[in-house]
Amino acid sequence: MQDTSLLFGVIPPSLCTPEQVATWDDGKVLHTYKLLRTPVNWGEIIQYGNAAMAIWRDNGTLTYIAPCNGDTHFPESNESKPSLWFYLNHLKLDITGNTEKDVAETAAFFLQLEEPTGQTSILDITGHTPDDFDFRAVDVQCLAHIFEVAPLRCVRFCCLTLSAEQSRVLATRPHAVELAFCGCLFDDHGDAFVDALLSRQSLFGSLEIEDNDLLSDNNLKRLLQADVLNYLGLQSLKNELLFLPLPARVDSLDYRMSSKSLMEDDFQHAFIAAKKLSLVIDHDGQQFPTEALISFLQRVAALGHFVSLRFLVIMPNRFIAIPVCIAHELIHATLANPNLEVLDLSFCNWDWEPHFEILFEGIKDHKQLCSLHLCARKPATSFGSDFCHLRKLLSVNRKIIVWDERENPFSDGSSIDALYELNRFYRGSAGLVAESPAERQLLLASALMENAADNLQCSALLLFDHLDVLFDLLQFAHLNELFGDNLRL
């Protein structure tokens, strides 16, 4: 651990102005410090564990630091000054100062203290000013650094103005990145960003744009011609651009449309290139948009190439009843997509529960479906008496797992758990077939002696699936030495 004896100097609260004081919920004053030297890395600052602090710098900025799960309340008076909030290494930081330039420079100072890590993480930077925070004072080397030290992190910029050169750096990282913008502006309307994307020779990764002002219409059209995006997330676009994202050459598309647009001829004949589709449907009527959903599901069925499908309807009425015809159309669309692996209905504000039995019966023979996501307010009754509908589905389809909206498998706590465990054994046994003969012999012997030793059903399954390996094992056994010459095979 670095010597920190000369890292911090305490500034007495009595010498702080009111806006330089942060407090806990219980009114305890947060200590304010001044850095006596530049820290070697973030470790010198965060080694204090859950301690919250405020750090004053010579440019007049104050940086309030606290754990993400802490109860520190930063001063409300800071809201009248330009500030940046961001989450970094399980900490939340609030940098406030007299000018946006000073705040941006302090943000760059702390960001450049990060050291490389192979862990996944999230960096969320949000500006707080009457208009978008001017982030252009942050050096482009700093932006490159935040991706270099954590290549697997998700980076999200919110309410910031970025320069053309900054946007070019974001678009030209040598590895695939996960990048999101919310309420941001490029000062060149995205010319440099899109130019850089179109000139890439490798995959960019994931791009999410949560507003329609980041790129000009022309640049948005150009972006949708790129073939370097794995994932693209967009909000609903203007009429003339509305259907352009559908044929975008991406692996995964997350888009938002109105229920009325699903009824238009342009949608009913649209090609959706993505194999993974997530669609949010806005509906402002009081009745369920039956015709719109039928149109959508029929288009999904006609295309037939999806491996992941997620859709939800946003409407005034919560948990509105779903017509049974929609359940039948969903079953048809699911079966018409033979490679579908994920079906996600978990974020709906309408009630699928009366149709679980019909849905389970309709999809039980799907060969590839392995992940079904649902929202069930009362699982004890939603899945039938004693979870009978769920139990039947899991007994027929050994691949599938039924998840709730929190990514936990639905279970009765006993027999369903045992069924999931048995199904995992089924899948594991089937997976052994892909191994080399020598590897299969070792794994089969290990499974018989350990995992399946006390379970007749599992032992029988292994022997049935791998009779060829069992025969090879018997061929090499010294049976005559064990049982005498009278043994006959």
Image (cartoon, grey):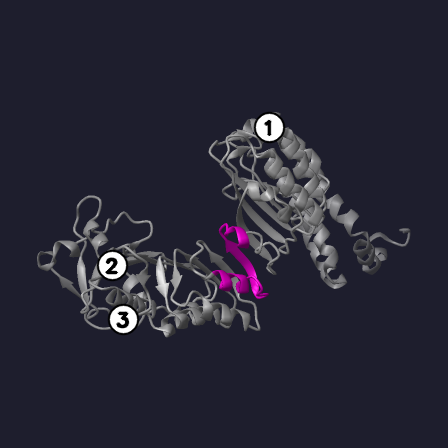
Q: Decide which of tag 1 and tag 3 comes sooner along the chain.
A: 3
The answer to whether one can see residue 391 in this image is no
Viewer-proximal residue, 393 or 452?
393
Other-residue count near label 1 (Cα within 10 Å), few / some / many at <14 / 14–19 / ≥20: some
Q: Which mark is residue 39?
A: 3
Q: Nearer the viewer, residue 230 or 6?
A: 230
Q: Position of residue 334 (x, y in %)?
A: 68, 43
Task: State the CA–CA distance, disc 3 to disc 2.
Answer: 25 Å
List the residue tagged with mark 1.
Answer: 354
Q: Position of residue 387 (x, y in %)?
A: 61, 30
Question: Is 81 left or right of 136, judged from the image as shown?
Answer: left
The span shown in magenta is 217-241
Residue found at x 30% / y 67%: 110
Quick one: SS at disc 3?
loop
**Nearer to us in this view, 402 or 291:** 291
Q: Inspect the magenta stretch and tell me whether residue 474 lies in it.
A: no
Few, some or many C-alpha atoms within 10 Å of disc 2 (few <14, some 14-19, many ≥20)? many
The kind of residue tagged 3 is: Pro
Residue 82 — which label? Answer: 2
For badge 2, the amino acid type reads Pro
